[in-house]
Amino acid sequence: MVNNLKKNNLKKKLELEESRPSQTFQRTILPNGMTIVFERRDIPVVSVAFAVRNGGINEDLSEKGISHFIEHLLYKGTPARDARKIAEEIEKNGGDLNGFTDELITAYWCKMPARHLDVALDVLSDMVKNPLFAEEEIEKERKVIFEEIKMRKDNPLIYTLDNIPGCLYEAPLGVPLIGTVKTMNSLDRKKIVEKFEEIYSPNNLILCVVGKADFNQIVSFVKKNFGDKKGKVPQIKIKTKYLSKTEKRAGIDQASLVFSYHIPLAGEKNAAAAKVLTTLMAGGMSSRLFHEIREKRNLAYSIKGDSESNKDFAYSFIYVGTTKENLSEVKKIILEEFDRVVKHLTLEELNSIKDQLVGNYQISMEDSQSQMVNLLMHEIDGNAKTFYDFEKKILGVTLEEVKSIAANALKMHSFFELIPE
């Protein structure tokens, strides 16, 4: 007769196997160095992205914001298409077009009816191969980014979150991804073209497709349309720190607080344990800090947390929107709850958080666009296929690993406060 422990382990194993994706995953690196990542689905929709292995982490201080600037400019025209035609070819065929810049990646993507995959591939590949970088477009887009910088500063939540890297890392990583007015003013066409030509080559590109498509067709397209030019991505040395600071601002009524801390870079175990800890503390209305700060004491409206973890750097944060008068008490509660985790976290609570994270993971795969981003981020970190190991990693997290991350956070952490003047 199987005992209860064996029954539970067998049940977990069966649940894990049932939740793994049945879709076909394929990945290849072509002779020119370009990586193709593909997940097939039967729904007649495709999400397609061309991404370059370059972002804010690869910029020196004098050029901060150039990756994001280039992202904007690639939508402004090629010899074959002006900005309007780029948008029309995607949107008139029922698609959505967008892009994003992160610390490790810059991506250009669209979501289309699967029957128009050829359009998606043709338009996006034209953008990443043949941008015009017209002088007038550079100057117009520079002004757009200046407005984006102002927008981010004017939004207390966004501004507070933008300050996390500056509390944990020295420049250039500690400078916001969007750059500054000074650095943006220093970027002329010559510098932009040089950076593009240095980085946007097949060996630095990833093509990710999720949806109803044929992998061989995708590979054939790349072989036909991309050469073998080699490029490089600059590597910037990362220096960590802990800085706590307070900023005062007129015209706001709410105080914004961020508690942040480094995650030791010792492999995927720490990343999984950190994700469990962040979810336990601030992962929704059932989390510890939501209950203690909002539900029990009515000290705040918004409480949220997240982890940023990759091969180059890793940190977690918790955000609280509260009043100036409540800041001290909120900070005290955060530290007390981390201390309680170190001393009293139970296996039952740990397993409950694991179930929550596995459920969140499964939901994240529902949309092809979200799954495209999931696969891209794991590819940047080494291999997209590791995304499918998420459940196994989370279920393998131990009490000791979570308690260790919490203990380190208690010893060394940063607070950033944006408060009414």
Image (spheres, helix red, strand yellow):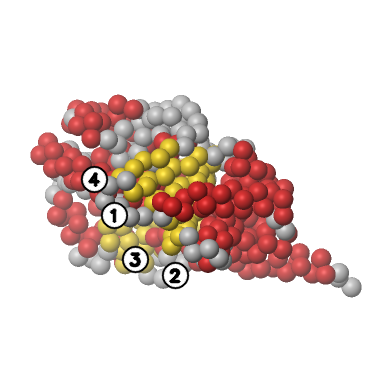
If you read the primary sequence from the N terminus, does the residue marked by circle 4 or circle 1 appear first?
1
Residue depicted at 40% across the width and 40% down the height: 246
Mark 3 residue type: Ala
* Residues at discs 3 and 2 in contact (Cβ within 8 Å): no
Q: Name the residue at the right extreme.
A: 1
Reading the image, the residue beneath label 4 is 150
Residue depicted at 56% across the width and 61% down the height: 292
Structural distance between the alpha carbons of marks 2 and 4:
43 Å
Task: Where is residue 389? Give x, y as percent.
Answer: 60, 54
Structural distance between the alpha carbons of marks 4 and 1:
21 Å
Reading the image, the residue beneath label 2 is 42
Mark 2 residue type: Asp
Rate crowding at label 1 as few (under 14), some (14 to 19) or many (20 or more) other CA atoms within 10 Å. Answer: some
Structural distance between the alpha carbons of marks 1 and 2:
24 Å
Which label was assigned to residue 98?
A: 1
Q: Name the residue at the left extreme.
A: 136
**In the drawing, does residue 155 fall left or right of residue 245?**
left
Is 316 placed above or below 216 here?
above
Mark 4 residue type: Lys
Picture quarter containing residue 270? Answer: top right
Task: Where is residue 366? Give x, y as percent.
Answer: 46, 67
* Secondary structure beneath label 2: loop
* Secondary structure beneath label 1: strand
Task: Where is residue 264? Give x, y as percent.
Answer: 60, 38
Which dot, 3 or 1, sits closer to the camera?
A: 1
* Residues at discs 2 and 4 in contact (Cβ within 8 Å): no
In this view of the protein, can residue 386 be seen by the observer? no
